[in-house]
Image: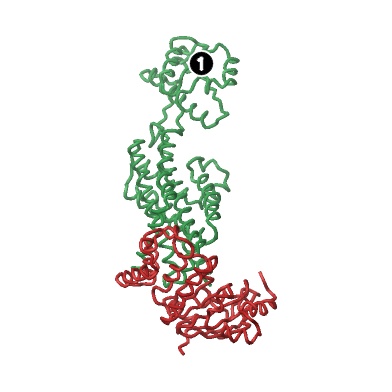
Chain colours: A red, B green
Amino acid sequence: MERVIMADKLTKKFGDFTAVNAISFEVYKGEIFGFLGANGAGKTTAMRILSGLSYPSSGKAMVAGFDVYEESEEIKKNIGYMSQKFSLYENLTVRENIRFFGGIYGMGRKELKNASEQLIERLQLGPEANKLVGSLPLGWKQKIAFSVAILHRPKVVFLDEPTGGVDPITRRQFWELIYEASEQGITAFVTTHYMDEAEYCDRVSIMVDGAIAALDSPLMLKQQFNAASMDAVFLQLARGAKRSE
Amino acid sequence: MKIFLAFIKKEFRHVWRDRRSLTILLGLPIMMMLLFGFAISNEVKDSKIAVLDYSNDAMSKQLIDRIGQSNYFTVFESVRNEAAIESAFRKGNIRLALIIPPNFGKQMSKEGSSIRIIADASDPNTANIVTNYMNAILADFIKSKFSTQQEPLNIKVESRMLYNPQLKSSYNFVPGVMTLIMMLLGTMMTAVSIVKEKEMGTMEVLLVSPMKPILVIISKAIPYLVLCFIDVLLILLMSYTLLEMPVRGNIPLLLAESLLFILTTLSFGLLISNLVASQQMAMFISLVGFLMPALVFSGFMFPIENMPLPLQIISNVVPTKWYFYILKTIMIKGLGFEYIIMPTIILISMTLIFILLTLRNFKIRLM
């Protein structure tokens, strides 16, 4: 299987504080990788390193075949990103948002036009496409934000708590979009606080105090920790955490 | 380049759709020009005065007539003694009193005479202004009476107001308003617009994209550059048509210097935006931390030469001072580039320093 993300003893220190402590893992093409951990466990920091926003203090990491130290510009072209804070422009229309984000990834005019019309059709936006994003319900915004993040067909899409504050039905629809993307070979790297979502992932890692405490498929994890649900697995691990917010 | 254009297009859309900010951007200069042009004025007209005429001769009567005819003074009352002057001041009826000594006419044609002017200095600026007007009228009067005679003992006061013979206050406030508006809009709007992206979380998405951070920053500033430049043109047009204030110097030079100053304010706005995390903070810093000194040290409202030395030194690091100086030199004195080389160099260096600091901070944030 093709490795899309590889981290080897990846470490990030802020002064004396070790936010990420020598984490190692691999993520494969088309995989949906859940990146779990309590607040302050270090998952956002790890994600920032992998997405080129921050440099590691030590260790090695490759994303989409490029080194995070040397080739962060190449990485940026090959990833998509959607943050927990909502990330479309509220006072642009849906269509303008799609065009803009496609544009900053260097998509050509024609390619962009086709891709945006396809997207509008697929999400059944119709006339809503010319409305300002600010006037749409949150669930819609997030579906659009995700679709925009994978518009340029990245190898990996990083999703930082993408479904925060969304109702269960919309969350379910959102995950269907992730599955679709994964079938097209786009790897999804997801952080979440919802344990039902952890069950949807192919594999899950759970970070505790900056280190990876467990990593496997949800099924195996439940067996390993002798738990009925991912919720129970998570609680067993996170309870042992020394640092918390 | 294509990415860059897409970005700028988006910025213009933001500005265009944010009607409130747009109103401020274009409405503020218009409002300030109207306010300063028609409502607020340094010219003091129709000041009421009291006259105590000990002489009561033909000469003194002519003088009083002359004063009354001017636009600046109205003789409110003629009093008999100095106590009456005092009480008129106390009641706030008059701004100025004139005491003409006995035998004014005779003395004048012999060895000269002295007239006392008393002004109400509870408002020192006004007192200064009305005293100056009075002096000018007196000097004029003396000149008209005695210029034909050879009178060695008469001291002729002849004052000439260079560059602004009519003492129009618009000559001072048009450059002043321009300076302040550029400072306010350039700095605050840029700072707020960038910090807004941080708050909304869109900045992260931009930084993860292949777009170079420096391009993100530059393209955020460009719409405000254009808008500030429109404001410059708007103010010049208004001052020319409504206030009848011509630009004496070279207009392309004036515009080029304005562009430079806009760049200074924008780069300062960028710097602020890098240092703060919320829109309120950005607004607060640009308003309180910067607009106040910009106002005080520009020389627009308070003469810098009158400040204590430490403050005079501080005033040198305030960009508004230099732009205000440049504007006055070009617009009012009509002088050329050779007279403003130094201020231009200072503004250029300030801009470069702001940009350099911005870049350094920006890199640190990404580490």
* Picture coordinates of residue A209, whole percent (x, y): 65, 77
Check disc 1: other Cα within 10 Å, few if <14, some if 14-19, many if 20+. many
Using the image as rendered, state which of residue B150 and residue A92 is in the foreground.
Answer: A92
Taking the image as shown, residue B328 lies to the left or right of residue A32, namely left
* Picture coordinates of residue A207, whole percent (x, y): 61, 79
Using the image as rendered, state which of residue A157 and residue B246 is in the foreground.
Answer: A157
* Picture coordinates of residue B57, whole percent (x, y): 46, 9
Please say if A4 is above or below A190. below
Please say if A107 is above or below A132. below
Using the image as rendered, state which of residue B194 and residue B330 is in the foreground.
Answer: B194
- Residue furthest toward the top? B57
From the image, which quarter does the C terminus of chain A lie in?
Answer: bottom right
SS class of the residue under badge 1? Answer: strand
Q: Is residue B323 visible?
A: no
* Picture coordinates of residue A180, whole percent (x, y): 43, 78
* Chain of the residue that carries numbered disc 1 in the rendered image: B
Instruction: Count up the numbered dots.
Output: 1
- The residue drawn where x is 43% and y is 60% is A133
Please say if B270 is above or below B72. below
The three-letter code of the residue at mark 1 reads Val
Q: Which residue is mark 1?
A: B51
Which quadrant of the figure has residue A34? bottom right
Q: Is residue B65 visible?
A: yes
- The residue drawn where x is 65% and y is 85% is A225
- Residue furthest toward the left? A110
